[in-house]
Amino acid sequence: MGPDLIRRVVEELAGELAGGIISRVRQPDERNVVLKVFTRGREKCLLVSAHHAYPRVHLTEQKYPSPPAPKRFCAYLRSRITDARINEISQVPGERIVNIEIEKRSDEGFRRYTLTIELTGKSSNVILLDEAGVVEDALRYFPAESSVRGVEPGVRLEPLPPREGVARESLPEKPEGLSWGEFLDAYYGALLEKDSSVSRRNQLRRLIRQADRRVERKLKNLYDDRRKAEGDLRLRLYGELLSQNPGRVKRGMTGVELIDYTRVPPEAVNVPLDGSLTPRENVERYFKKAKKAKVALGLLEKRIPATEDELDYINSLEYEWENIETEEDMDELTEELVSGGYLKAPSGKTAAEREAGEGEPIRRFTSTEGFTVLCGKSARGNDLIVKKHMKENDLWFHAANIPGSHVLIKAAGKKVTEKTVTEAASIAAYYSKARDTKKAEVLYAEAKYVKKPRGARPGAVTVKEYKTMVVEPRIVIDESRG
C-alpha cells in the first residue's frame, strides 16, 4: 500500500472504527494481527498485516485461524488493549505509517497507547507505544546496535529514516459500490492465493528435482559397483591359473606370467601377486574376491532395474507437474509424492477422500463415432484406468518410451473404428512429453495384453503384444463434462 491508498483507507477506517471498543485480539501467524472492534452495535474485524510483499491495513471478512496458544505479541496486546477504546486513526502525512490512538480505563485511571503500523515492505512492523512514545512491545524487534533504528521494549521510537528512490504509486481501480475494505480484502486475497499456489507448485517441482538428482546419483553408483564387480569376477581366472601352476609361484613374488590354455590360441597372462602371501593364500584371495563379486552382481541385478524404474517414475512425476491445471492436480501430485516417500504426509484429504468427493483423476472424451475415451491425469488415474476401467475388448494407448498418460477406448462390445483409434492415439501423444512435437510414436494394445505387475509403482504396466502408429499430438474431440 502506498501513501495515497493508505490515506483513503484511513479516512474510511476513521469513520467506521473511531469510538469503537477492541473486544478481541488475534494473531494467526508471524505477520498478521486481527483486531475485533465492537462499534455501532456490531463487530468488525481490522486486519493489520506486516507481510513482506503485501503490507496492509483494512477491514476484512476473511476468517483467520487462532493458534492453540497466543503468540508473544498477541498475548501482550491482549493484556493492554482488550476492552480499550479507539479514539483516533490517522496517517503520518505522506508516509506508509498509520497510528491508532487507544485509551483504556484501569484502576489507576485512563492509560493511553498508540498502535503504530508501519507498512514499509520487508521492514513492516506493528508497534505498541506508551504515552511517551516508548516501545512497550512490537511484532518484530530490531536491536539498536545492529539496525538503522532500534525497535524493542524500552526504546523510544525514533522516526523512520528518509526514503530514497521511492517508486510512484499506482492506485488499484476500485469498482463502484465497494468500500475500500471490501475491495482490498478481495484484491489482496486473490494475490495471496495466487502466490500461495505458485509457491506450492514450485515446492513440488523442487521436491521432484531433488528426488531425481538423488536417484540419478544412486544409479550412477550402482553402475560403478557393477563395473567393479564385473572386473573382480574375472579375477577367478587368476586363481585358477595359479592353482594349476603351483610350482611356478614362490612367496615374495609380485607377479608371474602364466599361459591360459582355455583361449584359442593360448595366451600369456600376467598375474599380479601379493609378495607377503603364500602361493595358496594368493589363490584363495582371488577366489574370495571373485565370489564376493558374484554375490554383488546378483544383488545389483535386482537393485539396478528397481532404481531405473524409480527414475522413470520420477520422470513421470515431472511430466505430471508440467501439466498441473488445478489445485486438485496439485493435491494429486502431493499425494503421489507422499506415497513414494518423497514428502511427509501433510494434513488434509487423502487420495481416497478426494476420489470420493471430487471424482477420479481421469479425463473423459467421446470420440466422433460415439466411443468413450479415458485419459489418466496422474499415475493414480493411470492405475485406475488399468485396474478398474479396462475390460478385455478395450484398447489401451501410451506414447512410446516417454512419460505420459494411459488412454483407453471403451469398446462396449462394439468393433473399434480406425478413426477412433487415431483420435485416441492423438490424445495419448498430446498428454505426454511429446506434446510439442509435430509427430509422435504411440503404442497400442488389446486390453488382455496389458498387465499391472504386483508391487509395481503407480502407472507402471507390462505390455505383451502391441502395435505402433505415428500421429500428431492434438485433441480432436471435446472432453466430456460431468
Image: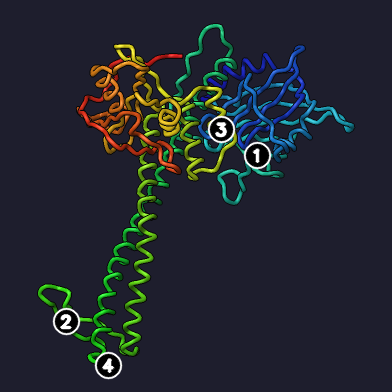
Q: Residue 92, relative to residue 135: is it above or below?
A: above
Q: Residue at x 23, y 19 (%)?
A: 418
Task: Give coordinates of residue 443: x percent, y percent.
Answer: 26, 32
**Disc 3 and disc 1: Cα gap in Å?**
50 Å
- Density class for disc 1 (Cα within 10 Å; few <14, some 14-19, many ≥20) is some
**Taking 422 as reference, is 36 left or right?**
right
Decide which of tag 4 and tag 3 comes sooner along the chain: 4
Callout 4 environment at 10 Å: few (<14), some (14 to 19), or many (20+)? some
Q: Nearer the viewer, residue 377 or 69?
A: 377
CB contact under 8 Å: marks 2 and 3: no
The circle on residue 250 is 4
For the rendered model, the colour scheme is: rainbow
Q: How many marks?
A: 4
Q: Position of residue 1 (x, y in %)?
A: 52, 25
Numbered disc in front, either 1 or 2: 2
Residue highlighted by disc 2: 259
Q: CA distance from mark 4 to mark 2?
A: 17 Å
Q: Which residue is mark 1?
A: 157
